[in-house]
Amino acid sequence: MAERIGEKFERLVDIMRTLRAPGGCPWDREQTLGSLRPFVLEETYEVLEALDRGAPAELREELGDYLFEAVFLAQLSEEAGDFNIGDSIDAVCDKLVRRHPHVFARQPDHDGITSVQVLERWEGIKAREREAAGKPAQQRTTLSGVPKTLPALLRAYEISARAATVGFDWQRADDVLDKISEEVAELRQEIESGATGDLSRAEEEMGDLLFAIANLSRKLGIEPEAALRRANEKFTKRFDALERAFAARDTALSDATLEEMEAEWQRVKKAPGD
């Protein structure tokens, strides 16, 4: 089985090299590490969508696309003389073995190790690796490990979760609801004062409100990015149905009144299977 998977992976790498070779695909030959950034992000979210749908066939295809982006980036790096995809595979394999001594170099004191202890030891091993490599020691803070490149809503969720591990948290979900009400009142005050727009006080209060909502999501055991993706999908489905209903009457949405659209929206919401 491992040999067959290896052969399939080598086929993907060979296809990538052919696409980039002279006489290959003009589009693929024009790409750079920078130009691939949006495609890497797009494939990441398509994997997440397949996970949300619980669709194995879709996930299988999206994981292939996701893997292709990794091979593409590695091919560009190989052409630049930096590293190849084999180096990346070696790096992650070696790292996984080093940072899982309780699996690959098991000792008597590893019996009964918990997931929390695994994470603590992982961070300790990582720190020792940096020191051995002569890299400057990173000042470790509670929030230093939260990537800044995460989507803002997910980062808010992770930040609040890390803060909660040291006891900086609301006791109950109801307490967060009170905080949300407070933030809504402060946002309303800024809106009524006319302080709206980019970098305004209203923007600041909106950020505080969204952060509080991310906290509530965490307290309820809900991953906010997944919840918002599902809400987006539900709204899109209903709005498409609304638009089709008006199209069936030869009426453009731009020609309908808000009252007419609201009435149709309520009918769509009550439709079977919505």
Image (tube, rainbow, N blue to C red):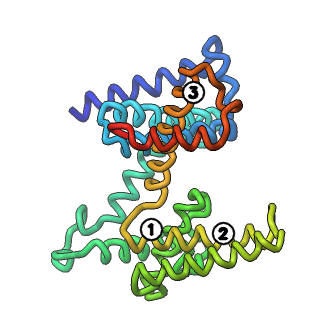
Q: Quadrant of the N terminus?
A: top left
SS under mark 3: helix
**Marks 1,2: beta carbons within 8 A:** no
Q: Residues within 10 Å of mark 3 (few under 14, many from 20)?
A: some
Residue beneath disc 2: 207
Type of amino acid at the residue the image marks with label 2? Gly
Tell me which residue sits at (53%, 34%) in the image.
Answer: 242
Residue beneath disc 3: 246
The spot of residue 19 in percent (x, y) is 57, 19
Type of amino acid at the residue the image marks with label 3? Phe
Residue 96 seen in the figure: yes
Q: Residues within 10 Å of mark 2 (few under 14, many from 20)?
A: some
* Pair 3/1: label in front: 3
Of residues 237 and 122, the one drawn nearer to the viewer in this rendering: 237
Residue beneath disc 1: 217
Q: With 39 as the anchor, is 57 left or right in this view?
A: left
Q: With 2 as the anchor, is 15 left or right in this view?
A: right
* Pair 2/3: label in front: 3
SS under mark 1: helix
Tell me which residue sits at (37%, 77%) in the image.
Answer: 120
**Marks 2,3: beta carbons within 8 A:** no
Sequence-first tag of 3 and 1? 1
Q: Quadrant of the C terminus?
A: top left
The spot of residue 109 in percent (x, y) is 19, 80
Type of amino acid at the residue the image marks with label 1? Ser
Residue 127 seen in the figure: no
The spot of residue 92 in percent (x, y) is 42, 52
SS under mark 2: helix
Of residues 16 and 230, the one drawn nearer to the viewer in this rendering: 230
Between the C-alphas of marks 1 and 2, the distance is 15 Å
